[in-house]
Amino acid sequence: MLLAIDVGNSHTVLGLFDGEDLAEHWRVATESRRTADEWAVMLNGLIGGSVGGADVSGIAMCCSVPSVQHEMREMFRRGYGDVPAVIVEPGVRTGIPVRMDNPKEVGSDRIINALAAVGLYGGPAVVVDFGTATTFDAVSAKGEYVGGAIAPGIDISVEALSRRGAQLHMVEITRPRSVIAKNTAEALRSGIIYGFAGQVDGLVDRMAAELAGEGADADDVTVVATGGLAPLVVEECETVDVHEPWLTLIGLRMVFERNTG
């Protein structure tokens, strides 16, 4: 089985693929001070096998936290030394040309999302990833990563608002009864849910128009939503075509196959 690991700033998502099927998945907190031994113990508990993972025949990982990537490398070396491992970084074949001023500064998870979107739905496409930040990634009709946008994520925005607003407090983020709220808690929920949905629709429309200027039809742009916070707002987004919660894991499976034959 292939172990796919997506290390984000707030959460780490892990999945086990049996062929093309995602057989199991987990989400854990990303802790930058966790050591290689602690990661090994955690994986041992999740997978249910030895530290070497008797059922793991390959590993693919993308990582946004350098300190975690260092410990992961050490854990792979000590616990999975005989298992092929692909860590997405410069030099790894993704098949996605990156048309950026500095391609190396683009997060590996964003390239992997673009790969998965093209593989599943073709280009042109826009991927909206609801994580610590809300990222928007544009893929041309030729399957090229052409750029994107980054906005503060939902959790960051809510936390900042509760800290700076003397009479505001953290609330459970659920769908409000109406857009025009009758109390403070509902007003916060309305601003969060419908405000972020409006942000997504506005940015996606502008990106689709620019992709159309590169030879695509704006109506042909597939908009794919992913990320742990997507379920909070995706139903209120008029522009989202597909919600694929495991897009990054699927992309990791694809890049592993591309680099190992």
Image (spheres, rainbow, N blue to C red):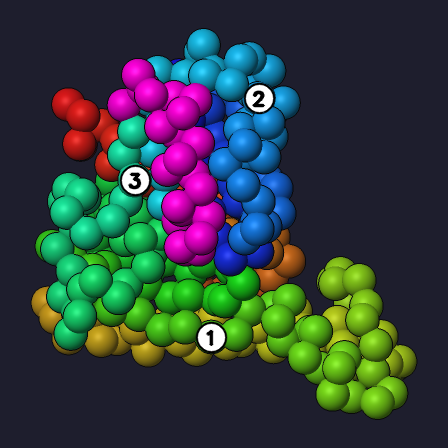
In the image shown, does 30 or 221 lie closer to the viewer?
A: 30
Q: What is the residue that sits farthest to the top in this orientation?
A: 54
**Element type where label 2 sits in the image:** helix
Crowd tier of the residue under label 1, counting other residues whose Cα lies within 10 Å: few below 14, some 14–19, many 20 or above = some
**Element type where label 1 sits in the image:** strand
On the image, the x and y values in percent for residue 39 come to 54, 34
On the image, the x and y values in percent for residue 91 come to 14, 47
Evaluate whether residue 139 shows in this view: yes
Name the quadrant containing residue 92.
Answer: top left
Residue corresponding to mark 2: 44
Q: What stretch is highlighted in magenta?
A: 63-84
The amino acid beneath tag 1 is: Ala
Label 1 with label 2: CB-CB less than 8 Å: no
CA separation, marks 3 and 2? 20 Å
Q: Look at 64% across and 58% down and name the residue there.
A: 232
Which numbered disc, 3 or 2, marks the residue that appears first in the sequence? 2
On the image, the x and y values in percent for residue 160 come to 68, 79
Residue corresponding to mark 1: 151
CA separation, marks 1 and 2? 36 Å
Q: Look at 16% across and 60% down and name the residue there.
A: 98
Q: Is residue 74 magenta?
A: yes
Which numbered disc, 1 or 2, marks the residue that appears first in the sequence? 2
Label 3 with label 1: CB-CB less than 8 Å: no
Q: Is residue 100 magenta?
A: no
Residue corresponding to mark 3: 87
**Element type where label 3 sits in the image:** strand
Q: Report the mark closest to the observer, 3 or 1.
A: 3
